[in-house]
């Protein structure tokens, strides 16, 4: 008979699975009753993973031109997509529908067709014949249908609209008019060349994304998630509002590896959210902390949920350049969350967990610290070895498996390794299909010049709204770009969301003279924040499902917690030194100081607390000071720092006068820990 702890663990896992299915469509896979179908899908997933590992290892036999590798990748994910996902919500998940076998057969034929026709593609300059039009049309329809099944209709509808735009662009008004293209030309461009479905978006899926998803699943299988929870508890569990800080640290660590905000919420939130509520945080605040920290993991180096590698590929720069640019904004984002958590705990008199019942850092490191070795190895390979990302990722997975064998607590059997590989393949399907569907959008944008037209439109609106003011024009352009990115990012996986926004919105910022890396980082930030902002705040709604709070209130609380993150992109657009571009030691120090000061002011303004409760006027001064620190100019920085000095000085005087008392709440009970 199960004891109480086992029952609680099982119930938590069930709740997590229920939340995942509710808020992440990608988790609604079939669960076959037939042992034969179970085995078939398991083997297909293993084949998928082993093929990509073998390709990454550099085996000469598997080295081929990009379009062939991309065709195999898309063919495999389409087969798995139609096998794993039913056509409709009410369709049985216990068996395969007859028409799915037809879809699967067609999907399996696609890479064979590319291999057979490739010499013709080369010799005819990708002009396309009747067979190419038929097979290309089938490929487009299969990708859109599979995307609809997995991620919902939004991306498929958007792709269909772009196809209509490609065909009938000559009827569009104003700057969006183009010559118009025949279906023959559109299909040929999208399916027999490297600019559409088999283009950049699928390239990053077939190389970086698949390997780092597999890496994340292997790390989870050997206990990295438990290690992050334990080390976070050891470092912060005993401090004021300790469980919330644990959520921030653990979710940030894990989120950088797994790259899925909703999955991260469910993985760490099932543990951290009940503890936050028990400590005294409201349901909405507890859910918001978990959501904002989980989304932020994709902004945090070294892996950024594979975004760092995708951005490096898109911009044509080295991985180290992206990491250097991303590190300071990400740390500022997390500093903003930590400060609000601390201020809320002080304001409401919340205590930490008993220190003597928290795991010790030394014990945690002794038990699972060896799991940090693969991450250190990955950084060495990427930064110092000179090897490709593909090769580095492959050997990091191998090293992870070997290092896990060093201690019984992390040791994996052959079945465990195979299960991790299968899980990685299943996790890849949703992202890869979205990338293939994004390829349609990116391809049409390139064929018709749509991205440049949008850039001109955004710039034109910004310039004409306040004519004659360059600063106001830039601000309005940034504002319109932010809204565009958040709308385009609603309900999509993070990497495809970034690829769409980088294609459509980033050119507007580059055309205004902004650095390319800053423009892409700006788009990436706001594509990620679509996970927090109502009405489609998937990460926040998932966290509300775990906390029992109101989804909309949790979403808006998440926006408040992430407010520093909303301001940071504007800061590095006005002051690129925040991305450590062309920065000296002195200017770098100045950037760090002013950025941290701005985050303190934002947190104080939002929470109404800084060493005591703040009156409304001081909150206004704090907000004004934070806004002044957005611009990197010396005068505005000085005024912002002056605002901080005024707020701190007044609060210290009010504290001495006894006007800033906060209530006191009893300490929370400690959780069970693997390290005792």
Image: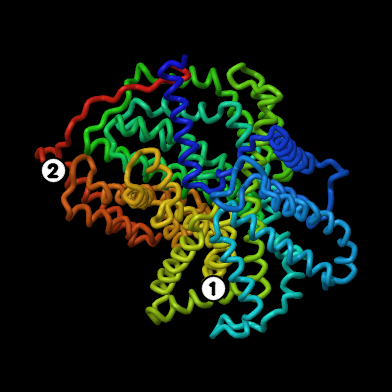
In this orientation, does residue 231 appear?
A: no
Depth check: give the residue in front, 24 or 203: 24
Residue at 26% from the left image edge and 25% from the top image edge:
667
Depth check: give the residue in front, 472 or 314: 314
Residue farthest left in this picture: 657
In the rendered image, residue 66, in percent from the top left (x then y), is placed at 79, 55
Please determine whether, in this image, residue 127 is positioned above or below residue 55.
below
Residue farthest top in this picture: 1
- Residue 218, by quadrant, is top right
Q: Residues within 10 Å of mark 2 (few under 14, many from 20)?
A: some
Q: Which residue carries the number 1 mark?
A: 455
Depth check: give the residue in front, 86 or 266: 86
Nearest to the eye among marks 1 and 2: give it: 1
Q: Residues within 10 Å of mark 1 (few under 14, many from 20)?
A: many
- Residue 55, by quadrant, is top right
Circle 1 sits in a helix, a strand or a loop, which is it?
helix
Residue at 36% from the left image edge and 32% from the top image edge:
274
In the rendered image, residue 8, in percent from the top left (x then y), is placed at 42, 24
Q: Which mark is residue 102?
A: none
Left or right placement of residue 396 versus residue 338 in this view: right
In the rendered image, residue 500, in percent from the top left (x then y), is placed at 58, 62
Residues at discs 1 and 2 in contact (Cβ within 8 Å): no
Tell me the distance, in whole angstroms, between the alpha carbons under discs 1 and 2.
Answer: 50 Å
Circle 2 sits in a helix, a strand or a loop, which is it?
helix
Residue at 46% from the left image edge and 50% from the top image edge:
329
In the rendered image, residue 14, in percent from the top left (x then y), is placed at 47, 32
In the rendered view of the protein, which quadrant contains the C terminus? top left
Q: Which residue carries the number 2 mark?
A: 654
Mark 1 / mark 2, whichever is N-terminal = 1
């Amino acid at each position: 008979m199960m004891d109480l702890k086992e029952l609680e663990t099982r119930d938590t896992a069930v709740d997590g699975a229920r939340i995942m299915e509710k808020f992440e469509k990608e988790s609604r896979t079939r669960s076959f009753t037939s042992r034969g179908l179970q085995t078939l899908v398991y083997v297909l997933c293993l084949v998928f993973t082993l093929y990509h590992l073998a390709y990454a290892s550099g085996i000469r036999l598997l080295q081929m031109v990009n379009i062939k590798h991309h065709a195999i990748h898309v063919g495999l994910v389409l087969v798995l997509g139609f096998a794993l996902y039913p056509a409709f919500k009410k369709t049985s998940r216990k068996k395969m529908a007859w028409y799915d076998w037809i879809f699967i057969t067609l999907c399996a034929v696609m890479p064979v067709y590319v291999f057979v026709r490739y010499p013709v593609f080369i010799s005819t300059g990708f002009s396309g014949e009747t067979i190419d039009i038929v097979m290309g049309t089938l490929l487009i329809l299969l990708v859109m249908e599979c995307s609809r099944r997995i991620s919902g209709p939004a991306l498929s509808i958007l792709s269909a609209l772009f196809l209509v735009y490609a065909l009938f662009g000559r009827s569009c008004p104003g700057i969006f008019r183009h010559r118009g293209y025949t279906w023959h030309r559109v299909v040929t461009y999208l399916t027999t060349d490297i600019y559409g479905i088999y283009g950049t978006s699928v390239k990053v899926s077939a190389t970086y994304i698949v390997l780092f998803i597999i890496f994340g699943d292997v790390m989870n299988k050997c206990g990295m998630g438990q290690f992050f929870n334990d080390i976070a508890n050891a470092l912060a569990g005993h401090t004021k509002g300790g469980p919330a800080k644990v959520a921030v640290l653990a979710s940030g660590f894990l989120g950088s590896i797994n790259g899925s905000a909703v999955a991260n919420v469910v993985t760490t939130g099932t543990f951290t959210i009940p503890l936050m509520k028990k400590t005294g945080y409201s349901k909405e605040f507890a859910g918001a902390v978990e959501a904002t920290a989980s989304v932020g993991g994709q902004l945090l180096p070294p892996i950024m949920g594979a975004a760092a590698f995708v951005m490096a590929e898109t911009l044509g720069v080295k991985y180290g350049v992206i990491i250097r640019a991303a590190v300071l904004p990400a740390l500022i984002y997390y500093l903003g969350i930590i400060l609000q958590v601390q201020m809320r705990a002080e304001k409401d008199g919340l205590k930490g967990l008993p220190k003597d019942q928290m795991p010790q850092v030394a014990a945690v490191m002794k038990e699972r610290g060896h799991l940090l070795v693969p991450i250190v190895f990955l950084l060495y390979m990427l930064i110092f070895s000179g090897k490709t990302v593909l090769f580095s990722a492959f050997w990091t997975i191998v090293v992870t498996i070997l290092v896990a064998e060093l201690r019984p607590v992390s040791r994996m059997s052959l079945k465990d390794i195979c299960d991790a590989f299968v899980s990685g393949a299943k996790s890849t399907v949703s992202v890869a299909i979205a990338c293939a569907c994004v390829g349609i959008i990116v391809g049409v944008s390139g064929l018709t010049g749509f991205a440049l037209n949008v850039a001109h439109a955004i710039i034109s609106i910004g310039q004409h709204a306040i004519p004659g003011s360059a600063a106001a024009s830039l601000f309005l352009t940034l504002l319109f770009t932010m809204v565009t990115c958040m709308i385009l990012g609603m309900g999509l996986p993070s990497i495809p969301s970034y690829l769409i926004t980088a294609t459509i919105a980033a050119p507007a910022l580059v055309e205004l003279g902004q650095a390319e890396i800053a423009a892409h980082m700006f788009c990436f930030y706001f594509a990620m924040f679509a996970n927090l902002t109502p009405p489609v705040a998937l990460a926040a709604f998932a966290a509300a499902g775990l906390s029992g709070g109101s989804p909309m209130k949790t979403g808006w609380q998440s926006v408040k917690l992430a407010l520093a993150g909303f301001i940071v992109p504007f800061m590095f657009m006005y002051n690129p030194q925040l991305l450590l571009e062309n920065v000296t030691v002195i200017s770098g120090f100045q950037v760090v100081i002013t950025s941290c000061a701005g985050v303190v002011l934002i947190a104080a303004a939002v929470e109404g607390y800084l060493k005591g409760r703040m009156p409304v006027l001081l909150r206004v001064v704090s907000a004004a000071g934070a806004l002044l620190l957005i611009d990197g100019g010396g005068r505005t920085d000085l005024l912002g720092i002056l605002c901080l000095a005024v707020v701190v000085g007044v609060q210290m005087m009010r504290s001495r006068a006894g006007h800033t008392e906060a209530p006191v709440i009893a300490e929370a009970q400690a959780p069970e820990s693997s390290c005792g």
